[in-house]
Image (cartoon, helix red, strand yellow):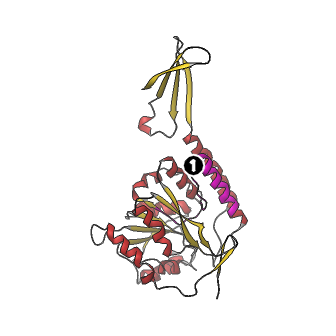
Amino acid sequence: MIIRSIKGNKYIQKPSQKPTIANLFQELYKYIENFKNFEDQVIISIVIPLYNEEKTIRKVLDCLPNHNSIEIIVVNDDSTDNSLHEIEIVQSYRNIKVINHKINRGYGAAIMTGIKQAKGRVIVSMDSDGQHSPDDLFTLVKPILDERADYTIGSRYLGTYFYQLPLSTRLGELFVEKLIRIFFGKKIMNNQNGFRAFNRKILPIFNDLKYDGYAFCTEQILKTSLEGYKIKECPIKVYDRKYGTSHIILSKLAINIVTLFFNYIIKKIRITVIKRDKSGTLKIYEKSLKRKKELLNLKFKKEYTYLNSIIFLERGYTIA
């Protein structure tokens, strides 16, 4: 069977034969050996949020790398189908850690649960619907281990996708892309893709994330940008969903993303207050809303001496 990839106006034939799992990850296995301090040290943690994907989860797990320095964590977000049974089958011959939510808490909350349990130096999130290709793991992980990025995002637009992309999806991502570029200075095209990796050192950014659903993907980007970490978009392959339907409610996601941007733009703004004392000196106070709690009482002050209605003479900078 021929499967074609849509990339612009170009159609690419997908190879009919796949390499074995052992051969597929040889480059990854060899590379992560350079970062081990002891034999069983976990270098990569793969977190998979799961909700009602009984048709795909076993195949997804079977296609993942099998190595003592790579742990796999599945977070079951209160699935009501046979997803857990499918995982148990894989657990009979592979080491898979499963964490269960007693209630459905949302996509972002499931990833957060996995992150808190992860031991790896690099943590990867990927979806359980079979759309992501595990052999792209190396593409996402390598820039982080090479210290060229703190956070990587898989992009079908830089890589390849094997299906007709819905217009609503492309327009939504284009809208978010423009907002991120205007307000945060980053160009991230495939900003809703769930296949991502990040350095363990940036874990604190997840401590106070507010969105538990799919807006979690966008919030990660905005928070990482605000904290000044390096973000890199990497080419990956994305396949069509063969079973089931997406759990995304577009109207809810759109509302959450709009409110999300409003909140983070406010955090980015610096409040400026101008005051003139009795001697005629203008004092300009600037306070960043994103400043850390221990610095909230500090005011960055610039003093200008009043000369006339147009010209002011800068005197210096102090912390008040």
Q: Residue at x 60, y 46 (%)?
A: 183
Query: Which span is picked out in magenta?
Result: 170-197
The N terminus, quarter of image: bottom right
Q: Whole-percent x and y of residue 42?
A: 35, 68
In the foreground, 255 or 165: 165
Q: Is residue 80 visible?
A: no
Furthest-right residue in view? 167
Residue 25 shown left or right of residue 130 in the figure: left
The vertical placement of 249 against 179, above or below, is: below
Q: Residues within 10 Å of mark 1 (few under 14, many from 20)?
A: few
Can you tell which quarter of the image residue 148 is in? bottom left
Residue under label 1, please give it: 185
Q: Is residue 176 magenta?
A: yes
Furthest-left residue in view? 38
Q: Is residue 217 magenta?
A: no
Q: Is residue 2 visible?
A: yes
Q: Whole-percent x and y of residue 35?
A: 33, 66
Q: Residue at x 47, y 71 (%)?
A: 137
Q: Whole-percent x and y of residue 304?
A: 51, 20
* Tag 1 secondary structure: loop
